[in-house]
Image (cartoon, rainbow, N blue to C red):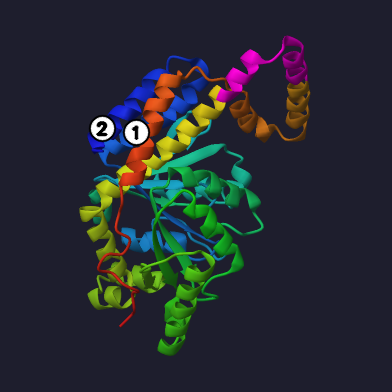
Amino acid sequence: MTTAALRELLQTAVTHLTQHPPTALLAARLQELQSRLTAGRFHLAVLGQFKRGKSSLLNALLGEPFLPTAVVPLTAIPTLITHGPERIVEVVFHDGRVTAVPPSALEQYVTETGNPGNVLGVARVDVRHPARLLAQGVVLIDTPGIGSTLGHNTETTLDFLAEVDAALFLLSADPPITAVEVEFLKAVQQHVSQLFFLLNKVDYLTPVEQAQALGFLADTLRQQAQLNGDLMLFPISARLALAARQQDDADGWQASGLAAVEARLFYFLNQEKQAALAQAIAAKAVDALHEAQQLLQTERRALTMPLDELQQKRDAFQETLVAARQKDTSSSQSLAAARRSVGFTQHGASTLGSGAKHWAGDASVSGASGYPLARDD
C-alpha cells in the first residue's frame, strides 16, 4: 500500500468520525496523523531515566545550551523542537492558549523548578531552531525522565509515547541499565519500533570499562527486552559533545561519539524516514480504530440491553463518576474517554481497519542495516 493510499484511508476515517460529536477527539487524532504523514513530520523523542543527560544530548545536537539542565530531575513538560530560521518558543496550555515567550524564559514553563507539578497547566512547549539536523523534517522531542520520586513526570512521558515515531533511548555508564529502564523500555516497545540506544557518560570510563559496559548493555537488551538482530548502540559523551560544538572542535566532536550518532540519523532521515513514518502512522491509526471498534461494541450492547438493566448500569456509573471526581479531579479526562459513544459506521471501521492493518503488516523498515554495534575507536 502506498503512502497516498494510507492518506486516503485516514481521510475516510476522519470523514466518518467527524459526523458524530462523541468521536470528535478520535477524529482530531487521526487528522493530526494525516497531517504529519503529508508533511513528512517525523517525531524523534529522547527517552530515558531521569538524570541520564537527555536535555544535554539535545543541546549537543542543537549546538548550544538551549534547553535547561540541572543536577536534579528537571524536565517536566514535553518540548517539541522543529526547524526554523530563528529561535522561537511558544508555550501551549491545556486550555488552548498559546503564548510566545523569549528562549530565556523556557525554564519557567518546562522545569520542576519553574513550574512545579505543572501548576501552570502547560501541555507542551513548541520550539523553532535553525539546527541543520532539524531541516531534515524531524521533530526532536525532550521528555521528562522516568523513575524519579516525581511520579507525574513518568506519567507524562508514558502518556506521550503514542506521539513518538522513533526514539533515542539514552542510558548511562553509571550503571549501564537498571531494572526500571528495562521495564520502561518494554512499555516504549509497545508504541515505538525504531530505537537508537545511546550510552552516555562514557568519558568517565577507561577503554576496558567502556567495552565491558557496552557488552553488558547489549546482552541485557537482547535477553530481557527481547531485542534481536543488530543493535544500534552508540557510546557517547553529551558533555564533551556540547563543549566541542561550542568551540567548533571537529576532533572533539568526533571523539565524543555524537558524530557517529548524527551521521546515522542523517542517513536514517534521508533514506528510511518516509517508510518509517508511514509504518508508525499506520500502527497509530490501527490503535485508534481499535478504540472506535470498542466504542461501537459498547454502543451495540447498550442498544440490545434491557431498559431496566441499562438504567442500573447508568446509575452505577454515575455513582462511580462522582466518587472518582471527589477523589481526584484529574481523572475526569480518562472518565470522559470512557463515556464517549461511537457513531462510526461498521463500513467505515472495517474498511479502514483492514487497510491500516495491511499497511502495518507490509511496511518494514531496516533496523540497523550496515550499522552493527557501534564502538568508540
Percent position of residue 312, x then y: 78, 17
At 31% from the left edge and 78% from the top edge, which residue is drawn? 255
Percent position of residue 105, x then y: 46, 47
* 63 in relation to 9, above or below: below
Identify the residue under disc 2: 5
* Quadrant of the rendering where the N terminus is positioned: top left
Circle 2 crowding by C-alpha within 10 Å: few under 14, some 14–19, many from 20: few
Percent position of residue 154, x then y: 59, 52
* 114 in relation to 319, above or below: below
At 26% from the left edge and 44% from the top edge, which residue is drawn? 84
Of labels 1 and 2, earlier in sequence is 2
Q: Are marks 1 and 2 in contact (CB under 8 Å)?
A: yes
| Front one among 191 and 235 | 191
Amino acid marked by disc 1: Gly
| Front one among 234 and 368 | 368
Alpha carbon separation for disc pair 1 and 2: 9 Å
Q: In the displayed structure, does residue 186 sit left or right of residue 309?
A: left
Q: Please, what secondary structure does the residue beneath circle 1 have?
A: helix
Q: Does the segment drawn in magenta span residue 33?
A: no
Label placed on residue 355 = 1
Q: Which residues are magenta?
A: 297-315
Percent position of residue 295, x then y: 56, 25
* 317 in relation to 149, above or below: above
Q: Quadrant of residue 354?
A: top left
Amino acid marked by disc 2: Ala
